[in-house]
Amino acid sequence: MIQQKLRQMIARRDLFRIGLGSLAGVMGAAALAQSASAHQGHEHEEEVEHPSGHGSNLMVGEVNHINNGFDPLQLLVDWDYGKVTQLPDGRVLREFEIVAYDREIEIAPGVFFNAWTYNGRVPGPSIRCTEGDLLRIHFVNAGSHPHTLHFHGFHTAEMDGIPGVGPGEINPGQEFTYEFEAAPFGCHLYHCHAIPLKRHLHKGLYGAFIIDPKQGRPPAREFMMIMNAFDTNLDGDNEIYTANTVGFEYARRPIPMKAGELIRVYLINVTEFDPINSMHVHATFFNYYDHGTTLEPTHRTIDVIMQSQAQRGILEFRHRAPGHYMFHAHQSEFTELGWMGMFNVTTEENFSAALESVGLDAEWDYKSTHGSAAISGTPAPTGQS
Amino acid sequence: MLKKIASQLLRLANRAVLLLLFALFLVVSAYYAYQYFTPQTPIAPAQVVAGEFSIEQILLPEPGVIQVEVFNGSQEAVIIPQVLVDDAYWAFTVVPSTTISATSVATFTLPYAWVAGELHVVRLITSRGETFDGEVVGTEQ
């Protein structure tokens, strides 16, 4: 009915123009009328799936993770330990290869973003090591603009990855090897520090940098979440907020976990254009370790944590009973723009089914429960849970 | 006698021809005057401006429903994969498709509890991340 009205409106507009117009106008109107009537032949209603989570507040469709080259469910657990060898003095040497290049990624179903990436993904690889390890990060800039690697941690000025100091910005086609000792232990990040800084961060050049304490942390199921956002129309405001790049992905595919087990989330905020971001976990309370640089919590029994840009920390909590439990930014605006997900808490018996329902397997289970760099260099066995 | 009648007929015919010629002159003059004084309005699709994609109108056909009518006046198809209301991504159906051909229309229907007397902002986001906004005030029941 409304379609017909709209066509009539256009037809009336055309008639008016024909009354006034030229031969070109008549031809144009004929073409438009043809275009409008062509739709009558195959008009259909494109149906939309409604996944669970937040009623009708959702993104329609699904992202093609294969085309993207990364899956947000895998980003939670795919720790990069580097190539591990032992130095003559007994220390562990970890060597990493990071290549910056431009790549289009799908950040919401059907919405594409011209990203700048580390190793073709946003966020870049989650570097994981133990305090005291020597890190050697070979950086190649295969992108279209100068870039750097700036790590949050102890290092010399030359290794700081900022313009004008040491190697400064690494130009396209050039490379540099950053080297420093991993310290202090904690939940850190790395990012590009080339200028303009906002643009280089917002385009996707950041990643997690997790340094485990030498004595380790209690066994837990561990996840890495980077709170990020995208200004798709480049007006200085974000159109999409999320954790690990794809809006509402964890609402479409809830993260599996078991009732009663300890959950540890390495949470990092790289959101541009907004002073803060936050995370709220439903139906439980967590202990929080600001920057992850202490073995004792800096906040106890809270259920919302706020982080400024580049602030990060570790959340530890347990869900007591099976069910779907929401987590999200507690800025409602961010929540409704994509930063919302669900935990699928199950019994031991139902856990395999929960994995399968979101396309995960025993290897993902292993990675999530054996994240510590103390087992680095040990390939995750397949078929083991 | 015959000669006189023939002469009168000839005079009448001449006058008719003259009248016809005068009428033709008036029509042609009027046409050119009209052409001269009337601005020539461009008409889609031949002269449509590239990127001229617009929200034509936003309707509230019943409580809990928003309909958004769009017109793609550009020369290329535009894909609208997501729709937002009041800064929130929202479920929708679309006729005929999220891919809107050049110089054609589409209608998006959203289940949204709009509020009488209050402003609502609808935003369409394209596959390239561009946005198009429209406003509607909830009608009183």
Image (cartoon, coloured by chain):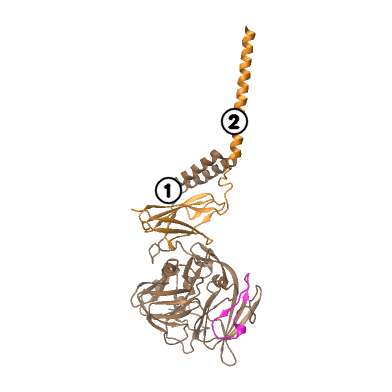
Chain colours: A brown, B orange
User: In the shown orientation, is residue A217 left or right of residue A31?
Assistant: left
| A342, above or below B131, in the image | below
Helix, strand or loop status at disc 1:
helix
> Residue type at mark 2?
Val
User: Which range is magenta?
Assistant: A140-161
User: Total label count?
Assistant: 2
**Residue B27, label in figure:** 2
Is residue A206 magenta-colored?
no
Local crowd size for mark 2, using a 10 Å CA cut-off: few (<14), some (14–19), many (≥20): few
User: Going by the picture, which residue comes out furthest to the bottom?
Assistant: A89
Residue A22 is at least partly visible in this image: no
> Residue type at mark 1?
Ile
| A335, above or below A9, in the image | below
Q: Main secondary structure of the magenta part?
A: loop
In front of the other: B75 or A91: B75
Residue highlighted by disc 1? A2
Local crowd size for mark 1, using a 10 Å CA cut-off: few (<14), some (14–19), many (≥20): some
Helix, strand or loop status at disc 2:
helix
Which chain is indicated by disc 1? A
Which chain is indicated by disc 2? B
Discs 1/2, front = 2
Q: Residue at x 49, y 42 (%)?
A: A12
Rendered location of residue A146, percent (x, y):
63, 73
